[in-house]
Image (cartoon, helix red, strand yellow):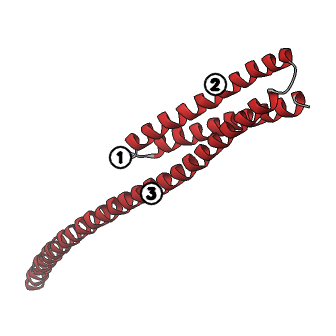
Amino acid sequence: MVIKNRIMKTNILSLVVIGLMAGTIATACGAAAKRDVKSAEGNIKEANEDLNRARRDSQEELRATAKTDWEEFKDESETAIEERNIQIGELREDISGINEDRQQELTVELDKLERKKNGLKERLVQRNEKFKANLAQFDESVRVVQNEFVKLFVSDMNELIASLKNLFENNIE
């Protein structure tokens, strides 16, 4: 019986010690876990701030690049329009020396091409105003619309140049 009591006391004492150790470990882990959670929250907050800063920097860089690209395109387009204006003036002079029927026919065609040139010039002015207004909230969708305008404008300008060239080559001897 004494042995049974001793074994029983030892078992109870072992259980108490194990319980205290488990409680101490659980408490220590909980405190460490809380420190880790607070540290992780701080890291997440810092990472979000870095991400937002990088996003703003990227937007600013995109905006600056788009503005530079647009200014370059606009300057080139204005130069091309002015060159077409000069070309049309020269063609008017060239057709003044041919027979009257043919001259009238070519003048009508040249007037049509001049209206197209003026339309391109007006579209460029309007798009420039819209671009400047949209620059404040510039994002990828504005960039896509801008690129579509540039493609269409260049296509129309190339068509005008080809038409003027063909008018000159095919009709003026």
N-terminal label among 2 and 1: 2
* Residue 88, horizontal then vertical, whole percent: 71, 33
* Residue 84, horizontal then vertical, whole percent: 68, 38
The answer to which image quadrant residue 46 occupies is bottom left
SS of the residue under disc 3 = helix
* Residue 55, horizontal then vertical, whole percent: 38, 58
Determine contact: label 3, label 1, CB under 8 Å: no
The kind of residue tagged 2 is Arg
* Marker disc for residue 136: 1
- Of 5 and 44, which appears nearest the observer? 44
Q: Residue furthest top?
A: 101
Which residue sits at x=35%, y=46%?
Answer: 136
Residue picked out by circle 3 = 64
Mark 1, Cα crowd under 10 Å, few <14 / some 14-19 / many 20+, is few
Mark 3, Cα crowd under 10 Å, few <14 / some 14-19 / many 20+, is some
* Marker disc for residue 115: 2
N-terminal label among 2 and 3: 3
In this view, the mark in front (2 or 1):
2
- Of 73 and 12, which appears nearest the observer? 73
Against 62, is 94 above or below? above
Cα separation, mark 2 vs mark 3, equals: 34 Å
The kind of residue tagged 3 is Ala
The answer to which image quadrant residue 40 occupies is bottom left
- Of 145 and 6, which appears nearest the observer? 145
Q: Would you say 90 lies left or right of 52 here?
A: right
Cα separation, mark 3 vs mark 1, equals: 11 Å
N-terminal label among 3 and 1: 3
Q: Quadrant of the N terminus?
A: bottom left
Which residue sits at x=36%, y=44%?
Answer: 137
Cα separation, mark 2 vs mark 1, equals: 33 Å
SS of the residue under disc 2 = helix
